[in-house]
Amino acid sequence: MHYDIFNGDADGICALIQLRLAHPISSTLVTGIKRDIQLLKKINASSGDQLTVLDISLQKNADQLKNFLTLGARIFYADHHQAGDIPQHPHLTALINTSTDTCTSLIINQHLQGQFPLWAITAAFGDNLHQSAKQLAKTLDIHSDTLEQLEKLGTYINYNGYGSCIADLHFAPDKLYQEMASYTSPLDFITNNPLIYNQLEQGYLEDMHNAEQTQAEYSTEKVAVFILPDKTWARRVSGVFSNDLANQHPNRAHAVLTVTPDNDYQVSVRAPLNNKTKADELCASFATGGGRKAAAGINHLPITELENFIAKFGEMYS
């Protein structure tokens, strides 16, 4: 059996689209909301099974990975998040690059020698790697209008991955992947699926409008903290709102906290675009935190830890 295991955001989806366009196979899809990253726990792989794992931290899945390798599974793993110690095993192919300027789809684009670069550009925009997206676009002589379309699509796909559960999303990530997977170009997907594209765009614009009415809970020249309410729109928009703040204020770090139904906070942290460091370090210092240097998060921050979080956040970027 072959499992395709991928993050439910733009990067994970676009990485798998590229791979399956290049190497079509029948597989079982395993994914979830963007924050659902311990995806290897969702399967029981055994000898002879093949796993393709995209855009989820190897460090967060290390125990299951080692167990599946021991059982005889073959695993292809591509990612740009914290990896920890990468096992050396003949059945593991690991393409790991934790540079702040790359993402899994760009890693796959390089692996496939640039067969489907428009999907990689779309994903890079979704991961808020605008410079990396534009650098790749320059090698293809893409018109500015086309680039803007790819930027919007990447943003909307990424936006769709956020929420506390699948019900919060406009489309389940596996279903959205299946709608896009047959298109060699994301531009063809936009043209041929106006209902899906328009629903994502309308949802994004409405949710962002709501978020933009929010005043900072705490702010200095170096950091700003925003708190969104326990609303479906807030859970959907937290990540893209964080990215938007980072783009507007490239010298400032941002944290967007969303009140959850469990009466705690879900946290999105963005390092300053001009100093893309320490977001992973900050979030990993809390029990349910992790991510990458430029962008990270905490799944469950107790309300009693809010002051401690703000203090650590301010110290980290002072």
Image: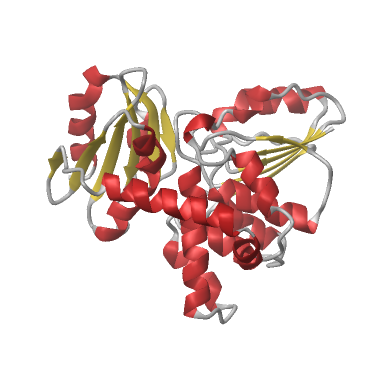
Q: Quadrant of residue 313?
A: top left
Work out which residue is located at the far front of the displayed protein and give it.
195
- Of 301 and 207, nearer the camera is 207
- 102 left or right of 130 in image: right
Where does the image place residue 173, in percent across and percent down from the top left? 60, 41
Q: Is residue 290 above or below residue 189?
A: above
Left or right for 166, reference 239: right
Q: Quadrant of the N terminus?
A: top right
- Give the side of residue 177 with respect to residue 200, left or right: right
Q: Position of residue 70 (x, y in %)?
A: 77, 24
As drawn, is 152 to the left or to the right of 45? left
Question: Which residue appears at 65% of the width and 47% of the height?
Answer: 177
> Residue 140's spot in the image, x, y percent?
60, 78
Tell me what residue is drawn at x 83 percent, y 27 percent. 72
150 or 301: nearer the viewer: 150
Say how the picture is coloured: secondary structure
- Rendered location of residue 14, percent (x, y): 62, 53
The C terminus lies in quadrant: top left
- Relative to 246, say whether 207 is above or below: above
Is residue 146 in view from this perspective? yes
Q: As displayed, is residue 223 above or below residue 102?
A: above
Which residue appears at 31% of the width and 32% of the height?
Answer: 258
